[in-house]
Image (tube, rainbow, N blue to C red):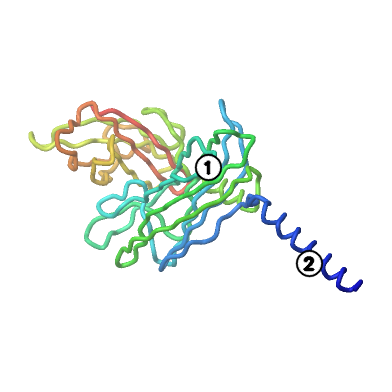
Amino acid sequence: MAMMRNAAHSIAMATLVLLCVGRVPAQAQDTSRWDGEPHGSTRLIGGATVKSADAKVIRAGIEIRLDPGWKTYWRYPGDSGVPPTLDFAGSQNIKSVTTLWPAPERFSDGGGGYSIGYHGDVVLPLRIVANDASKPSSLRLKLGYAVCGKLCMPAQADLDLTLSGKAGAQEPMLLAAEARVPRRLALGEVAGLGIAAVHREAADGKRERVIVDVAVPDAVPIELFVEGPTAEWALPLPQLAGPAPKGTSGTQRFIFDLDGLPPGAKAQGALLTFTAVSPSEAVEVQARLD
């Protein structure tokens, strides 16, 4: 009889433990699970909370890992391709999410043009502001992206992560990704790499083009990318024309035709975003066309 009472007591205690465990909320982690597709996989990364001027910001990121030789696109894909789509609907206790974009590279699209994007392993840093900083936040992401080898394939991921707001094992990776995000400068501000001047001109009386003079320290190789005011603009990639005439030492000139404007759009006064990338740094400059 005593043995039966002990067994019943043990079962009751075990049941109580299981019920209590069931009431424990999900613990915050610094990574989500990997969501794999052929030739690519993605996950979310959580990092530390940092203080900005007017809010506490949680550092996080989207890691995209690609097979050797495969690529994915930047926010502006270039001559061909589609940019990633990020849907954070379903997140909890999150007021805003800002996506940062590390400096991309140019690569052949296989059809005579060039695309803009990443290869290997890339992390897109996120800046997250919670509705209530005293409570945990849960990040939910539906990600659409492309993985490209000789052909491109669409890929999707459904990711979620409860954010701890504490520095974890992925913090160095997030810091390294943030270091690759272009610095924002004003037009004419030259601190090493910079955009010295932008102007519009008629090349043959009918066709207009844009001239961009880029200050390049130590004559290092650079890439220049340009984006229009909205996603409907599909401007061509600027082409290097050589040293800027009568320019200062180390200034390179890029030229591109004013093609790819959406119907009804006007070039004059349009706000363009220029991203200049060297092997060691990158800058982002906004300028209005004259």
Residue 266 horizontal side relative to residue 192, left or right: left
Residue 70: image quadrant is bottom left
Q: Residue farthest to the right? A: 2
- Identified at 86% across, 72% down, the residue is 4
Q: Position of residue 243 (x, y in %)?
A: 30, 40
Q: Which mark is residue 92?
A: 1
Mark nearer the viewer, 1 or 2 = 2
Which corner quadrant of the image does residue 151 belong to? bottom left
- Given residues 229 and 115, the one toward you in this image is 229
- Which of the numbered marks, if any, corresponds to residue 181? none
Q: Nearer the viewer, residue 148 or 16?
A: 16
Q: Which mark is residue 11?
A: 2
Residue situated furthest front in the rendering: 1
Residue drawn at the location 41% of the way across and 47% of the way down = 87
Identify the residue at image location x=56%, y=48%: 174
Q: Residue type at mark 2: give it.
A: Ile
Q: Residue at x 89, y 73 (%)?
A: 3
- Residue 99 place in picture, x, y as percent: 45, 42
The residue carrying pointer 2 sits among few (fewer than 14), some (14 to 19) or many (20 or more) residues within 10 Å by Cα, namely few
**Callout 2: SS:** helix
Give x and y (percent) for residue 190: 42, 31
Q: Nearer the viewer, residue 285 or 174?
A: 174
Kind of residue at disc 1: Gln
Q: CA distance from mark 1 to mark 2?
A: 37 Å
- Looking at the image, is 70 positioned above or below residue 176? below
In the rendered view, does 77 fall on the left or right side of 283? left
Look at the image and tell me in which quarter the C terminus lies.
top left
